[in-house]
Each structure stands twice: as structure tokens, then as C-alpha cells.
Amino acid sequence: MAAGPPPPLEPSPLPTFPEEGFADKFLRKTRENPLVPLGCLCTVSVLVYGIICFKKGNTRRSQLMMRARVIAQGCTFAALLGGMAATAFKSR
């Protein structure tokens, strides 16, 4: 049994969109996984509201908003991973 060299590892070619601008790419990615931009918007909203509460001196509400921001970031990250997994399984 003579074993030859292992076959070269060649990744599958990625789809290319040569004439796609930033806005077109953003819209396509948003349609593919709409939860990520929504999560980003939610995270930024909670962060801004928490900073406003901190500036006004409402420390209790500010702490609550910072904890909510961490939860929103976690949900956004989970949506990102879920979208990546769905795309990977869809391509198979």
C-alpha cells in the first residue's frame, strides 16, 4: 500500500459581487440577517440612554441601562453567530 501525497486543501470559492457598492452590500447583508443591525441599534440606544441618565445624576437607572447594554450586546453577538451558522448550513 503506497500512500501518495495528500490532496491539496483548496477552499471553496466565495461568491463575489464586483459591482456592489457599500449601500448595496449593506442592504444585502441586512436582508440576509436582519437581527444584527437591529441588535446594534438596540445596543447603541440603551448605551446612549444610560449615558444620559448618568449625566443627569440618576445612577440607579444608569447602572440598569449598562446592564441592559451588556444583555443587548450578547443578543447581537448570538444573532451574528446564528446568522453565520445558518449561512454555512445553507451553502451545504
Image: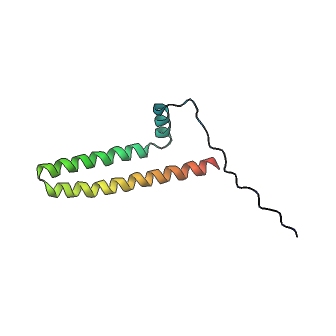
- Residue 2 in the image: above or below residue 55: below
Q: At which x and y percent is residue 68?
A: 28, 55
- Residue 2 in the image: above or below residue 68: below
User: Who's the residue at 42% across and 46% down the image?
Assistant: 36
Indicate left or right for 90 with 22 as reference: right
User: Who's the residue at 67% across and 48% down the image?
Assistant: 12
Q: How many marks?
A: 0
Q: At which x and y percent is residue 46?
A: 27, 49
Position of the N terminus, as image quadrant, is bottom right
Instruction: Point out the residue furthest to the top here.
Output: 19
Q: At which x and y percent is residue 83?
A: 50, 49
Instruction: Point out the residue furthest to the left here.
Output: 57
How does the figure colour the protein chain or chains? rainbow
Compare residues 49 and 8 and report the one nearer the observer.
Answer: 8
Indicate left or right for 4 with 27 as reference: right
Indicate left or right for 68 with 82 as reference: left
Instruction: Point out the residue furthest to the bottom here.
Output: 1
Instruction: Point out the residue furthest to the front here.
Output: 5
Q: At which x and y percent is residue 43?
A: 32, 49
Asked where in the image residue 69 lies, by quadrant, the reply is bottom left
